[in-house]
Structures are given as C-alpha cells and as structure tokens.
Image (cartoon, rainbow, N blue to C red):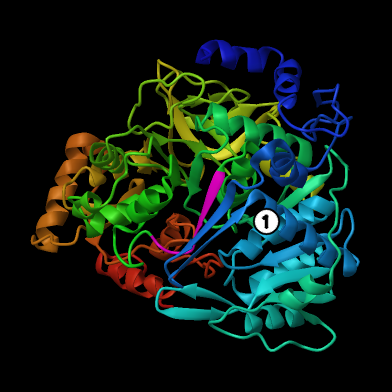
Amino acid sequence: MPNYHAEFQRSLSDPSAYWLERAKDVHWYKAPTQGIDSSHSPFNTWFADGEINACYNALDIHVENGRGEQAALIHDSPVTDSQSTLSYRELRDQVAQFAGVLQSEGIARGDRVMIYMPMIPQAVIAVLACARIGAIHTVVFGGFAARELAVRINDCSPKVIVSASCGIEPGRVVEYQPLVCEAIQLASSPVGTCIVFQRAQAQWPLQEGRDKDWDTAMQSASPAECVPLKSTDPLYILYTSGTTGSPKGVVKDIGGSVVSLKWTMSSIYNVQPGDVYWAASDIGWVVGHSYIIYAPLFMGCTSVMYEGKPVGTPDAGAFWRVVDEHRVKVLFTAPTAFRAIKRVDPTAELLKNYDLSGLQTLFLAGERCDPDTLQWASSNLGIPVIDHWWQTETGYAICANCQGIEPLPIVPGSPSVPVPGYDVQILDSDGQAVANGEIGSIVVKLPLPPGTFVNLWGADDRYRSAYFERFPGYYETGDAGFIDENGYVFVMARTDDVINVAGHRLSTGAMEEALSNHPDVAECAVMGVRDELKGQLPVGLVILNDGCTKSHEQVSAELIQQVRNDIGPVAAFKLVAVVDKLPKTRSGKILRGTLRSIADSTDWNMPATIEDPAVLDDITQTLRSLGLAKKQS
C-alpha cells in the first residue's frame, strides 16, 4: 500500500504525469497523451486528445471480461416491499435498448435529456443510455416543484424528459405527471417528448403526440452501441442551488469523470471488483451520480440502490437489514441518516437483530459530521467511520482518510487530509495564508484534479466570478475552517456561517459540536443573527432524543452552560430552543440560511429543495418566542 504523503506530493508536483498514469486503468478508444491543459485557466481540460465512453467503462467492458453474470445493480425498495437484481449483462442489454429508444426520438451526441425519476432501476438505465450515445443527462430529483423543474428546462433545453408515473414516500404516492405537465407549460423552452415508466402505484395518462410508454418503446427499439466520444465532451449537467436564486448547472466531462471516479473506489473506499457497495443517497444528488451509478460500475462492483428511509421503512433497523441481506462491504451515507437512527434507537438495540460482519467501513458526507454522531456509529458498529468532505462541483472527496492508500488516525470533527490532487489552503479575506488553527476561507489551488466541474452550463462568466474571482488562482469552496498542525482539515461552516460576536470570529460548527455532545441532543443547528450591540449572536435549535424526560427549560439551561464551558463566555450563547424538526433539503442538509433570514426578519423565498415546508411555520413561532423573527409573514 503506498504512503499517503508520497502519493499526495506526487499528485501536486506533476499532476499531468500522475493522472495520465491512472488513466491507464480505464478503457480508451484513443488513449490520451495530454494530461492537463491549463492555458485558459480556470477553464482547464483533462486528457483532451483522448476518446472514451463512460457507459462502455461501466458495463460493456465487464461483460467482455467475464463479469456478465455478476450482479451490477440491486434495487431494494421497502416502500414497495420489493427487491430486484440486474446482472452486468442484463443491465448492459437494457441500457443499449433504451439508448435505441432515445436515438429513435432523434437524440444524438450533445443533446440534453432530462431525467425526472424516483429511485428505480429505470433511472440508472436512462442515465447510462445517455452516456452510451453521447447525450448529456441532467437528473432532477423526483418530486421537485414544477416551477423549479421549468427553470432547469429553460436553462438546458432538453429535447426529451424521461420520467415515471410516480414516486413513493412513506405513507403517500407522489404523482409526477401533474408536476411535469405544469413545468412544460411554465417553461419557454419546448420539450418534444416525454418517455414515461408506468409504476403500479399510479398511472400517467399519456398525452397523444408527446408522451411515450417506456415498455412499449423498449419493445420496438433497436439496441444502440457505445459511441466513441471526446474526453472533454460533457457527461452530465447537475443543478445546484445558487446565491442569486437561479440554479447553477454544474458540468462534468467524460474522461476526467471516468478516471477519477474509478480511482476513488480503490484509493478512498478500498473496494475491488465484485465487492458490494452501497451509497444511501438519491440519484438526484451528486452522491447518487458518482456512487450509486458511475463509480461502483466503473470498478465492477455491485451497487445497491435503496428506495426507502433510514427510519420508518419500517423502523430504525432498516439500514442494518440492507447491509445484512446484501452483504454490503462499504456504506456511504449522510450524518443526518445516522442522527435519525440514533434519535429513535439511541442504544442501537435493533442492530443486534442483524449480521453486519461483512461491513468493513462507514463513510459519511454531505454535511459536517459532529464527533458525537461519529463516535456513536463507531462504537456501535465496531468499524472505522470515515467523515469525508466534498461538493457537487468536485464530484468526489476533497478531503478523506484514504483507506486504499494509507489509513490514517481518525480525528473526530475532521474529514481528515486532502485527497491526492487537491492542494487545500486556508486564506484570510485579503487572500493571505493564515496560521495553523486559524479559521479562514477554504480554497483549493488550481488546477483542480480531473473529474471536477469544468464549467457552468451556458454561464462562463458566472463560473469565473462565482468560484475563481475572489481568490485568483484558487477555487473558492464557500466553506470556512482551519488546518491543524498535523495537516488535518476542519470544515466548520459555510463561509457565511462564521459569525462575528463582538469582534470575535466564531464557528457555528464548533457550537453545534458542543451542543451535540449533550447526551439528550439528537440533532442541532446554530446560526448567527443580527444584534445591535455585538454585531451577531448565536442561536441554537435542538432536537431531543426520544425518551428524554427532562423539561425543555432544564435542557436549554444545560446547553447554554455546555457551550460556555466548551467555547467560552466569548460565544455569548444564550438563545436556544427545543424543536420537533429542523428544516432540511431532501438530501438532509439543514437550511441554515433560511433560518437566519427568518430570525433576522429579512425577506426570504421558500427553498425549492425543502423536504417539509410546514416545518418553517413551527420554527418561526419558536424563534418569535426567543424575541426573533418579528416580521409577520
């Protein structure tokens, strides 16, 4: 196993040589001789003279190399009480067939296809079919509001929308047809065809001349072969929220994605061909793109696709059942999932009902992992629990404890050290490096490694100004934190969540860590609100573990004292309230910016990604009880 520090230094000293060597591990129609071209930085390109196909690397190559009968995709759906498995051969054949359906609708290289589907195998088939023929897929989380869907239609002008009749949430069916039809009516960019997979739980009434039935189209199509494509051709567009209110269409290229994602499977996650890998996410998010679909299949693993929740489908042992039944080797999910499990089953009693002996590592990402959650998972599972940090824009980890290179000591609160290829630094507001342990803006010195975003769709100027203008020569992550004396990175908050209390720059993440250390706290959020005297003051919202018998007043008093003990009086932490729920996105991130706007009584818009809008009404009343949120809605 290579030494981490040697591997990391090699990746920075000669990026082109380092990644060209890794590029030898994937299939090329024309092998690249050029590593990075940074002549038009920050619009850098990787492997520009290479020709490749992502679908071939995900499916065909494994069938040809003898893995055709191995399970490629396991679909586990507790919400429909069903399971199914597709072998590499079966998945390859269905993808080729659907690629033929797309070709019959006039889809060719460079055309955009929007995929608006729940967590079903047909969503994976549609994604890989686009990659097979060079179409650019843009996946939108199923159930997204019609207006948000229309914004994305206008931005990338898809010729075809691939959808399903419904998505299924615990206790309810979400029909997609009304949402898609309203979005098409709202959009100014025309959509020629909707291809619809009909689920048993709801039917989509097909509109003649526009809508096509998935099964019928598959029966009449001719299978399509993989098309050799330029390494620099776009693989997909994935929209992420923007500060201006308009979403940003993050663009990933083909060659860089194939090389980097396959490399991460062995280097970061320490999995090999044939291993079972489960990313408990949604294909509408970047984790689903990278680690439900592409990376596991590039490596020849078996990928688990889960249509359910960590609790409630049917209970807090749901994850343990999936790991047991499918012999999962590596699980990757968000800390939110484990906080939910811990809240309902704080002593992990349900874990005793399952055999998790095959599980070697748990990886967490998507938000900052508080040490209490990490330690709870580690002590109950008895395996390494690895917090790692990455973003939609990067597509894989910026910082991680790379289990396939050299496992390093786990430091709770830190996603460990920079992954090879990422030169992570901490800068102050003037762009100067800060001392170890001092909080500043987390940036990555250019060039970024392959597989990271190469542009924003149709928005060159926004790409440059949003990410590279404030700190020339660096990618601005938008996160704040510090690097300790051992080189471990601590991501403490989004840049706008570092608050200034009477001139002291304090991390809301550190305060959340103090709150989460309280034995009765299941989950928490801290944000800074305006204060005439001190500039800003921290406000805490906490969810208690099930079974807590203390009064809310007693818990609040204990929490205020705990922050005073852990952070100090300088934090001026005096405002805290107990709530039943926190407002979150569907991917589990707490909407701290929205909370801050409500508390400050400033104008705000309902976030398109919010999971349960009703939670904000309850939160507003709670904040008013603290003397905040004085503006009437």
Q: Nearer the viewer, residue 218 or 330?
A: 218
Is residue 391 something one can see in this rendering? yes
Q: Nearer the viewer, residue 565 or 192?
A: 192
Q: Is residue 233 left or right of residue 544?
A: right
- Bounds of the magenta segment: 302-309
Mark 1 secondary-structure assignment: helix
- At x 75%, y 70%, the residue is 161
Query: Is 577 placed above or below 257 here?
Result: below
Query: Is 387 placed above or below 484 here?
Result: below
Q: Position of residue 68 (x, y in %)?
A: 67, 46
Callout 1: few (<14), some (14-19), or many (20+) C-alpha neighbours within 10 Å? some
Asked whether residue 69 is drawn in magenta, I would say no
Query: Is 242 placed above or below 421 here?
Result: below
Q: Position of residue 182 (x, y in %)?
A: 69, 82
- At x 73%, y 31%, the residue is 26
Q: Is residue 178 left or right of residue 27?
A: left
- At x 77%, y 51%, the residue is 131
**Looking at the rendering, which quadrant does residue 575 occupy?**
bottom left
Q: Is residue 45 left or right of residue 519?
A: right
Question: What amino acid is labelled 1 in the image?
Answer: Glu
Q: Position of residue 497 (x, y in %)?
A: 44, 46
Q: Is residue 311 left or right of residue 432?
A: left
Is residue 501 something one can see in this rendering? no
Q: Position of residue 154 (x, y in %)?
A: 78, 68
- Disc 1 marks which residue? 90
- At x 37%, y 42%, the residue is 369
User: Number of numbered discs present?
Assistant: 1
Q: Report the quarter where the C terminus lies.
A: bottom left
Q: How would you classify the magenta stretch by its main secondary structure? A: strand
